[in-house]
């Protein structure tokens, strides 16, 4: 779902047929000015989507930017002003919902990125996202310095444990040959949950290997084996990575680490919106 559609549906959910409070209590024809304010420090994300919210309600709305996407913001700073008619009241909550959530994801991602980059490791998002909100959440990860990974089941091949369990490595190996001819520009990644899996995956023509839910000792063995046999293979660590153990995994120096909590366990950044006339 593209971002315009997400925003329109969010407004429809909130306003439905009308914003009854605004229509009854606020007279038309009055100009109001609102300010987005940072109530805590973090990474700003979603300000451009917030503009779309207000533009849908009033194409003549005006904005003044004090900060831009990806900026580090600090408590007390003004982020953007919005000048509009009474529809400013109708768009306030939807705009805040987007900015607060995306800034929370970007802020969380930046913390992981700052640690991982010391070891030359990239931070990737996963598909563990809010239904219909993935495009925005992945965007926020990128805003925080991370990478989106695949956006869905359509833009890269990910052969996971259930595929392997059902098909077996021999059949998968043959099917990868077919994939290479039919989808030459698509990445093929395979999931390994044991050293035995790693041995079998190394016999295939995949591009990347995900070491999923392995402990540190197993990962060290896997990395040594992979780098001896397939130096071209992209190595990804995944499963249970969090703020407490990211350094431990980053020190192993895989190519990338994918982290589900970036988009499923984030805290929204505290941002407010104050209106004056």
Image (spheres, helix red, strand yellow):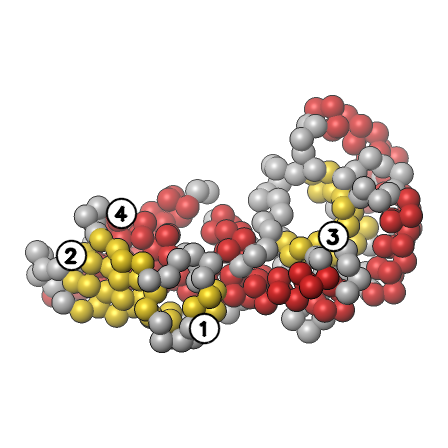
Judged from the image, the secondary structure of the residue bearing numbered disc 2 is loop
Q: Are dots 3 and 1 in contact, CB under 8 Å?
A: no
Task: Tell me residue 163's x, y (percent).
Answer: 76, 42
Q: On the image, numbered disc 1 is attached to which residue? A: 41
Task: Tell me residue 166's x, y (percent).
Answer: 80, 41
Inter-mark Cα distance, 1 to 4: 29 Å
Residue 56: assigned label: 4
Q: Nearer the viewer, mark 2 or mark 1?
A: 1
Task: Tell me residue 73's x, y (percent).
Answer: 43, 68
Judged from the image, the secondary structure of the residue bearing numbered disc 4 is helix
Inter-mark Cα distance, 4 to 2: 13 Å
Task: Tell me residue 17's x, y (percent).
Answer: 22, 51
Image quadrant assignment for residue 251: bottom right
Judged from the image, the secondary structure of the residue bearing numbered disc 3 is loop
Q: On the image, numbered disc 3 is attached to which residue? A: 255
Please rate how many residues cluster around mark 1, counting C-alpha atoms within 10 Å: few if below 14, some from 14 to 19, many from 20.
Answer: some
Please rate how many residues cluster around mark 3, counting C-alpha atoms within 10 Å: few if below 14, some from 14 to 19, many from 20.
Answer: some
Image quadrant assignment for residue 203: top right
Please rate how many residues cluster around mark 2, counting C-alpha atoms within 10 Å: few if below 14, some from 14 to 19, many from 20.
Answer: many
Inter-mark Cα distance, 2 to 1: 30 Å
Which residue is nearer to you in this view: 9 or 199?
A: 199
Residue 85: assigned label: 2
Residue 128 to residue 37: above or below: above
Instruction: State left or right for residue 212 relative to residue 63.
Output: right
At x 65% / y 57%, what residue is drawn? 123
At x 50% / y 69%, what residue is drawn? 267
At x 53% / y 59%, what residue is drawn? 144
């Amino acid at each position: 779902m593209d971002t315009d559609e997400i925003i329109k549906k969010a407004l429809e959910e909130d306003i439905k047929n009308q914003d009854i409070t605004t229509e009854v209590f606020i007279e038309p024809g009055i100009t109001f000015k609102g300010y987005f304010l940072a109530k805590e420090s973090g990474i700003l994300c979603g300000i451009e989507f917030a503009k779309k919210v207000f533009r849908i309600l009033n194409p003549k709305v005006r904005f003044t930017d004090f900060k831009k996407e990806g900026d580090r913001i600090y408590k007390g700073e003004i982020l953007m002003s919005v000048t509009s008619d009474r529809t400013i009241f109708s768009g306030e909550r939807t705009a805040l919902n987007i900015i607060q959530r995306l800034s929370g994801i970007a802020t969380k991602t930046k913390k992981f990125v700052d640690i991982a980059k010391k070891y030359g490791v990239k931070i990737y998002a996963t598909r563990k996202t809010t239904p219909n909100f993935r495009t925005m959440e992945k965007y926020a990860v990128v805003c925080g310095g991370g990478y989106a990974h695949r956006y869905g089941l359509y833009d890269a091949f990910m052969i996971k444990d259930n595929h392997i369990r059902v098909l077996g490595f021999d059949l998968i190996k043959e099917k990868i040959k077919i994939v290479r001819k039919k989808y030459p520009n698509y990445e093929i990644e395979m999931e390994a949950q044991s050293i035995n899996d790693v041995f079998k995956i190394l016999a295939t023509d995949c591009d990347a290997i995900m070491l999923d839910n392995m402990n540190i000792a197993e990962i060290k063995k896997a990395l040594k084996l992979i780098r001896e046999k397939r130096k071209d293979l992209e190595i990804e660590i995944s499963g249970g990575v969090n703020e407490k153990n990211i350094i431990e995994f980053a020190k192993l120096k895989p190519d990338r680490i994918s982290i589900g909590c970036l988009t499923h366990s984030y805290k929204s950044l505290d941002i407010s919106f104050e209106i004056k006339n």
